Image (cartoon, grey):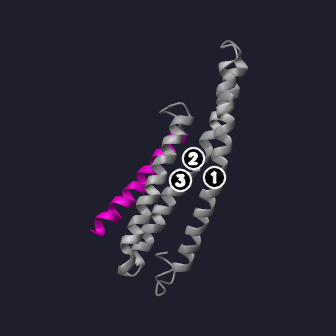
Amino acid sequence: MVSRCSPEWRDAPGVAAQANLISERAVELAHTDATVWDEALGALRGAENTPAEDPRRDFALEKKLTAAAAAPLEIATLGADAAALAALAGEHCEATYRADAAAAAALAAGGATAAAHLVRVNLGVRPSDPRLARALASERAAHDVAERLLESTR
């Protein structure tokens, strides 16, 4: 919205298009996340009924939980990307819309936080996992942008 309401900004249409693509991809990933989580939950329930010494139990479960972490990881990345676009829009938009850009960045940061949390849960809390590190880096980046924008509009 901020980009669309800034007709003097030459790059506004491109930023608006990128924001729309992020939004569409996030919706797709939310649907994917629901599907893969259902599959992971089924594997968790199946593992309860499989003898602990059966090596297939842990492999099947690990595979499903890894798949369940992929969508939230990408959502966290999209949150950081959306916050960066909000910052760009906030720098170039009409002053009337700067608070809206800050609000967009805050929402993106919230989404990145929720997604990073799901990555952590789905990966079984392995701090050394590079996927968790990527999700947390996206979360931090989105929050840094949001805090800066929110502060600048007070």
Q: Which mark is residue 84?
A: none
Quadrant for the C terminus in the image: bottom left
Q: Give x and y (percent) for residue 140.
A: 41, 50
Q: Which residue is mark 2?
A: 72
Magenta-highlighted residues? 131-154
Q: Which residue is mark 1?
A: 29
Q: Is residue 41 above or below residue 47?
A: below
Q: Is residue 82 above or below residue 119?
A: below
Q: Give x and y (percent) for residue 46.
A: 70, 24
The majority secondary structure of the magenta stretch comes to helix
Q: Check whether the beta carbons of the residues at disc 2 and disc 1 lie within 8 A of each other.
A: yes
Q: CA distance from mark 2 to mark 3?
A: 9 Å
Q: Give x and y (percent) for residue 11.
A: 52, 79
Residue type at mark 1?
A: Leu
Q: Is residue 104 left or right of residue 33?
A: left
SS class of the residue under badge 1?
helix
Q: Which residue is mark 3?
A: 77
Which badge, 2 or 3, is on the more N-terminal residue?
A: 2
Verify whether residue 118 appears in magenta: no
Q: CA distance from mark 1 to mark 3?
A: 12 Å
Residue type at mark 3?
A: Thr
Classify 10 Å Cα crowding around label 2: few (below 14), some (14-19), many (20 and above). many
Quarter occupied by residue 47: top right
Closer to the camera in the image, 1 or 7: 1
